[in-house]
């Protein structure tokens, strides 16, 4: 099981010490439990002794709490996900399942150079995003998470749903949150085969409420993200290690429309942290070209990965991969950020 710091890292904005606004859950606990039970009725959150489990299992209770947290976030974008590993499949009765996930392929798979000089170069030559210099009634985010709502069978086979979240946040912190549960994806082919048989004719996804309108102060932060280096470094928890900082950067991108000055400071702060290496050019799970850095935490069998736009410095994705078996543990994929004048 994850240790205290790893649980804090995974909870991110749910941790009351992290200075992030915690909105209400996108669906009720009853709906969340029913969704998980319908998807894996024969599953249990704990595996038997000796089960074929390679990654510490987070309990569904913990994951339900973490999945209920939305800290602001994204821009509308109909971006088709590129399936890096395998293809979607169906059950004998037609239930659609997602693919087996593969880790992102790096330009520098072995002996990667230190990331510091590359990050500083990127920070010093950032270009503008479509939203820089613009505004609107709502800050809008669109992003996808995988690894948050997990089911593990007694035999140790695992699946996790993809959750797409779109949020509209007004300056007073009120707004709207839309959550769409997409078919499950899998850390390995054996798990996909197992659930392909077990799900049978049951639907892989249970519909939830179309959206939640939330009151002031609950959808996200009302104030913009600081660009002051010292204050920003403190908010990024740089004293807790590279993995925690990478996760906190992801949290900030979920909560804020990050301005150009803050994007540059984030990259420059990362450059000062020990342990980050440059993975070079990569392609993210939406098919976009970017550049990546990673941080290894062998004690907890975790490699944290961040993918950035090579021109604007925007965060495209954050992932955690098992170091020993190179299995994807969790990912967050940002599809777009920006502003909107109407609720969607």
Image: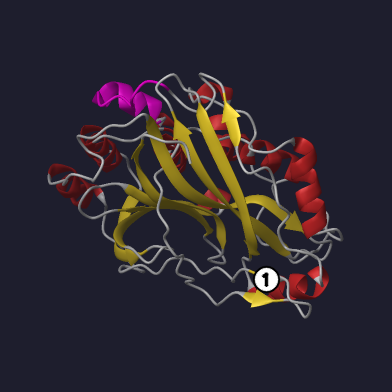
Residue drawn at 23 percent across, 45 percent down = 129
242 and 73: which is toward the camera: 73
Whole-percent x and y of residue 107? 30, 69
Q: Please, which residue is most extreme toward the bottom here?
A: 92
277 and 46: which is toward the camera: 46
304 and 250: which is toward the camera: 250
Residue drawn at 59 percent across, 71 percent down = 100
Q: Please, which residue is most extreme toward the front here?
A: 342
Can residue 53 be seen here? The reply is no
Q: Is residue 206 above or below residue 186?
A: above
> Does the magenta run of residues contain 227?
yes
63 and 31: which is toward the camera: 31
Residue tagged by mark 1? Answer: 96
Helix, strand or loop at mark 1: strand
User: Which residues are drawn in magenta?
Assistant: 222-236
Residue drawn at 58 percent across, 30 percent down = 213
Q: Does residue 237 appear left or right of residue 201 in this picture? A: left
Q: Does residue 130 appear left or right of residue 80 in this picture? A: left
Whole-percent x and y of residue 48? 84, 59
Q: Quadrant of residue 210?
A: top right
Whole-percent x and y of residue 26? 63, 37
């Amino acid at each position: 099981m994850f240790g205290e710091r790893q649980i804090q890292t995974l909870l991110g904005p749910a941790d009351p010490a992290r200075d992030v606004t915690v909105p209400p859950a996108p669906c009720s606990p009853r709906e969340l439990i029913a969704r998980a039970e319908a998807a894996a009725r024969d599953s249990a959150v704990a595996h038997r002794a000796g089960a074929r489990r390679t990654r510490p299992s987070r309990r569904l209770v913990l994951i339900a709490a973490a999945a209920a947290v939305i800290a602001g976030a994204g821009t509308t974008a109909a971006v088709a996900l590129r399936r890096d590993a395998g293809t979607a499949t169906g059950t004998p009765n037609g239930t659609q399942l997602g693919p087996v996930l593969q880790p992102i392929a790096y330009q520098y798979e072995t002996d990667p150079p230190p990331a510091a000089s590359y990050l500083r170069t990127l920070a010093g030559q950032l270009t503008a995003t479509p939203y820089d210099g613009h505004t609107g009634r709502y800050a809008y985010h669109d992003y996808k998470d995988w690894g948050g709502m997990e089911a593990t069978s007694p035999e140790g086979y695992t699946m996790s749903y993809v959750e797409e979240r779109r949020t509209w946040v007004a300056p007073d912190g009120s707004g709207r949150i839309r959550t769409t549960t997409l078919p499950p994806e899998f850390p390995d082919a054996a798990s996909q085969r197992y659930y392909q048989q077990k799900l049978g004719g049951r639907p892989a996804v249970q519909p939830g409420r179309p959206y939640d309108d939330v009151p002031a102060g609950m959808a996200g932060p009302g104030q913009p993200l600081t660009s002051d280096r010292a204050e920003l470094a403190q908010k990024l928890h740089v004293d807790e290690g590279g993995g925690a900082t990478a996760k906190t950067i992801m949290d900030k991108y979920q909560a804020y429309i990050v301005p150009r000055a803050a994007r540059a400071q984030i990259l420059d702060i990362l450059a000062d942290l020990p342990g980050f290496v440059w993975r070079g050019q990569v392609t993210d799970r939406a098919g976009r070209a970017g550049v990546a850095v990673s941080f290894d935490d062998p004690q907890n069998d975790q490699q944290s990965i961040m993918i950035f736009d090579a021109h604007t410095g925007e965060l495209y994705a954050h992932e955690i991969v098992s170091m020993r078996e190179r299995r994807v543990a969790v990912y967050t994929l940002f599809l777009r950020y920006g502003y909107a004048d109407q609720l969607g």
